[in-house]
């Protein structure tokens, strides 16, 4: 099977975890791991696994433009603004894991298919990755007047980017509940819990619905959870959805796969897992386009 | 203590919002704010119990939009300062800015006692807007004085004028309060004030507040009739009386504050905070006082003992804001109980 070559920019925790996940992809072939710190553990691990590495940043990667078609950016929002521009000029597709959001927010299973032509897509927040699919699942069978989510993550799994931009997290997630999930109004809350041993990421979704059939809502949620589990195996319902009058409550837990990041950091795992899923969809689309072009040439 | 001055922040219209199940009406807020102001309360806090933007399914929806309540209070307060509370992660700078536009002169930015760095944007914004900023380190019983000092210094470095030791769980005994307040007082710059916020779950709210003052706190919180989460806060009217006897100046007229408590607040109280088995368990287990009414509801719905829920939450080191864990734990306990009954019946077979 023809594979699509990809690169990771950012050799920190997220980039490194992503590397282990990409190793398992049958469609994507990781070629390069790009960092800026020579002694970075991520770069060392990448070298050991036989990937090409550089600590000279995106410029060196772009000198090998024929060695990747999709670049995953796991750096910072500020760095991504610059990377996005360079990747676009080089004709590469960018999957952005930073909060930069140069391209549209995507959540696999919900809105990705409408954005496969985009040169740059952004993985909406971890809270959004965990909860938007549930809101969308309810929205398939009922009108969602209001959706509210609460994400609780282990303090240790919340990096300085999240901490110093906590308002952006809640606002971006709330908007994603509306624009991607399909709720008329959205609200998001994030809580950091410092308990040791660290807690596994939890999410609670509350939805106020109109004209919803409880059994249909329940079944739609359960089906969605099963599909998210295909790329995030540790994504699960803590209890059956609860119904009180027009309110639906869904309690979720996200345990990470423990590839590089610890299992409690489900909030980070769901980002890297979703990134792979997004990369695969975009990769399939590139292959289809290429096959289509060849058919045209053959004619 | 000699003659000293202490500033009381009355939080009837914020912490009391929990006990009111977020049902405050405009006229009630007006009457209470006016009464407190006329009695000489220097700082009067008005917000959803969980801070600005707290109106939610997770914490309870406010009957009246908080903007409306804040604006109403601002119109009534003439001598004192209007304060608002904000918990980063729940509310955002947008609500903070709006509250200042509506007349807030003091903003209190609260985080869990180990997470001060999520408050940087908000504390800085408060200073930029030219208002007084108090940092609030919640659930302060969960860490020792050293850690608390580290976090208080962060808040101070962002610009906080005062840092509070917040006993959100009403779980601290006097020695624990003294050690924390003393550590902050010694570590922070002399111009940075230290405050203490009590809950009465162990019947220590007023005495702990006095201990905090003895250790150098210059700000303490109270609420009229103790209207607040869990077994309530230190009663403002009691604080005023006790401090007056100790020669500490509060600027509040004792009889007038008694009258506000008795005539304005008590008649509208829907839930009277008291030390009962559930609120006592909160203090004993060290969980967020706000969980009280949520735990009652979950206990009833899932037919489990509220105390079992609270103890389990304490064991799991759940922090403020995690109200969804109450239902989570209640579901789990009821399932476990059902399984035990099932097993017992199998054995009998």
Image (tube, coloured by chain):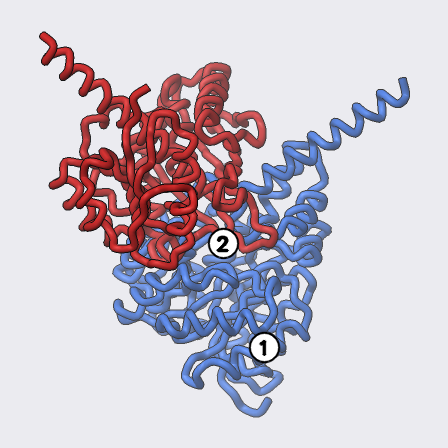
Chain colours: A red, B blue
Please give the label number shown on residue A26. none
Crowd around label 2: few <14 · some 14–19 · many ≥20 (10 Å): some
The quadrant holding residue B216 is bottom right
Image position of B253 (left or right of A172): right
- Mark 2: secondary structure: helix
Chain of the residue displaying label 2: A
Q: Secondary structure at mark 1?
A: helix
> Residue at the location (37% across, 65% down)?
B107
* Image coords of residue A198 (percent x, y): 57, 50
Residue hosting label 1 = B212
Look at 49% across and 73% down and name the residue there: B8
Mark 1, Cα crowd under 10 Å, few <14 / some 14-19 / many 20+, is many
Q: Quadrant of the N terminus of chain B?
A: bottom right
Of residues B295 and A218, which is closer to you in this image? A218
Toward the viewer: A152 or A68? A68
Residue that badge 2 annotates: A155
Q: Is residue B224 above or below residue A248?
A: below
Q: Are marks 1 and 2 in contact (CB under 8 Å)?
A: no
In the picture, which quadrant includes the C terminus of chain B? top right
Q: Is residue A238 visible?
A: yes
**Residue ranking furthest to the bottom:** B2
Q: Chain letter of disc 1? A: B
Q: Is residue A7 left or right of residue A253?
A: left
**Tags 1 and 2 both on a single chain:** no
**Name of the residue lying farthest toward the right:** B348
Distance, label 1 to label 2, CA atoms, is 29 Å
Choose between B246 and B129: the one closer to the eye.
B129
The spot of residue A220 in percent (x, y) is: 45, 18
In the depicted structure, whether residue A106 falls above or below residue B228: above
Q: Answer left or right for B50 relative to A278.
A: right
Name the residue located 65 percent from the left edge and 57 percent from the top edge.
B286
């Amino acid at each position: 099977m023809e594979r699509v070559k990809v690169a990771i920019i950012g050799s920190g925790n997220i980039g490194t975890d992503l590397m282990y996940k990409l190793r398992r992809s049958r469609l994507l072939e990781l070629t390069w791991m790009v960092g800026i710190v020579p002694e970075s553990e991520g770069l060392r691990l990448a070298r050991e696994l036989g990937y090409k590495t550089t600590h000279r940043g995106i410029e060196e990667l772009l000198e090998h433009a024929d060695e990747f078609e999709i670049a995953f950016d796991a750096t910072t929002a500020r760095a991504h603004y610059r990377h996005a521009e360079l990747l676009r000029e080089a004709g590469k597709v960018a999957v952005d894991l930073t909060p930069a959001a140069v391209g549209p927010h995507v959540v696999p299973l919900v809105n990705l298919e409408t954005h496969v032509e985009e040169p740059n897509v952004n993985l909406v927040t971890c809270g959004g990755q965990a909860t938007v699919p549930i809101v969308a699942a309810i929205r398939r069978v009922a009108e969602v007047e209001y959706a509210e989510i609460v994400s609780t993550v282990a303090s240790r799994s919340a990096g300085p980017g999240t901490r110093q931009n906590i308002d952006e997290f809640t606002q971006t997630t709330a908007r994603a509940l509306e624009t991607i999930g399909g709720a008329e109004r959205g609200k998001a809350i994030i809580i950091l819990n410092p308990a040791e041993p660290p807690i596994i990421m939890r999410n609670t979704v509350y939805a106020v619905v109109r004209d919803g059939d409880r059994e249909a809502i329940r079944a739609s949620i359960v089906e969605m959870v099963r599909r998210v589990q295909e790329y995030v195996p540790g994504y699960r319902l803590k209890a059956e959805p609860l119904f009180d009058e027009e309110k639906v409550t869904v309690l979720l837990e996200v345990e990470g796969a423990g590839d590089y990041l610890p299992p409690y950091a489900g909030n980070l795992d769901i980002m890297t897992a979703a990134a792979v899923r997004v990369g695969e969809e975009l990769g399939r689309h590139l292959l289809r386009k290429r096959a289509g072009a060849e058919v045209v040439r053959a004619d | 203590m000699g003659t000293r001055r202490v500033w009381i922040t009355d939080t009837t219209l914020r912490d009391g919002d929990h006990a009111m199940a977020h049902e405050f009406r405009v006229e009630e807020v007006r009457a209470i704010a006016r009464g407190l102001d006329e009695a000489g309360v220097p700082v009067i806090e008005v917000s959803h119990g969980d801070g600005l933007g707290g109106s939610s399914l997770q914490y309870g929806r406010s009957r009246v939009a908080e903007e409306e309540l804040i604006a109403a209070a601002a119109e009534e307060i003439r001598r004192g300062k209007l304060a608002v509370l904000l918990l980063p992660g729940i509310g955002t700078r947008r609500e903070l800015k709006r509250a200042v536009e509506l007349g807030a002169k003091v903003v209190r930015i609260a985080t869990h006692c180990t997470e001060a760095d999520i408050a940087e944007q908000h504390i800085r914004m408060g200073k930029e807007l030219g208002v007084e900023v108090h940092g609030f380190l919640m659930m302060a019983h969960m860490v020792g004085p050293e850690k608390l000092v580290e976090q208080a210094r962060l808040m101070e470095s962002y610009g906080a004028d005062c840092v509070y030791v917040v006993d959100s769980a009403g779980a601290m005994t006097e020695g624990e309060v003294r050690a924390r307040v003393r550590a902050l007082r010694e570590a922070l710059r002399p111009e940075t004030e230290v405050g203490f916020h009590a809950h009465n779950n162990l019947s220590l709210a007023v005495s702990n507040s006095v201990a905090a003052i003895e250790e150098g706190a210059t700000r303490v919180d109270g609420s009229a009739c103790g209207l607040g989460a869990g077994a309530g806060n230190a009663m403002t009217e009691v604080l005023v009386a006790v401090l007056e006897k100790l020669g500490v100046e509060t600027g509040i007229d004792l009889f007038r504050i008694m009258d506000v408590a008795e005539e304005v607040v008590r008649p509208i109280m829907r839930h009277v905070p008291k030390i009962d088995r559930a609120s006592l368990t909160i203090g004993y287990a060290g969980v967020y006082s706000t969980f009280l009414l949520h735990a009652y509801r979950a206990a009833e719905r899932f037919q489990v003992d509220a105390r079992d829920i609270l103890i389990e939450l304490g064991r799991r080191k759940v922090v403020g804001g995690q109200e969804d864990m109450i239902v989570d734990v209640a579901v789990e306990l009821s399932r476990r109980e059902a399984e035990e009954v099932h097993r017992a019946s199998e054995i009998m077979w």
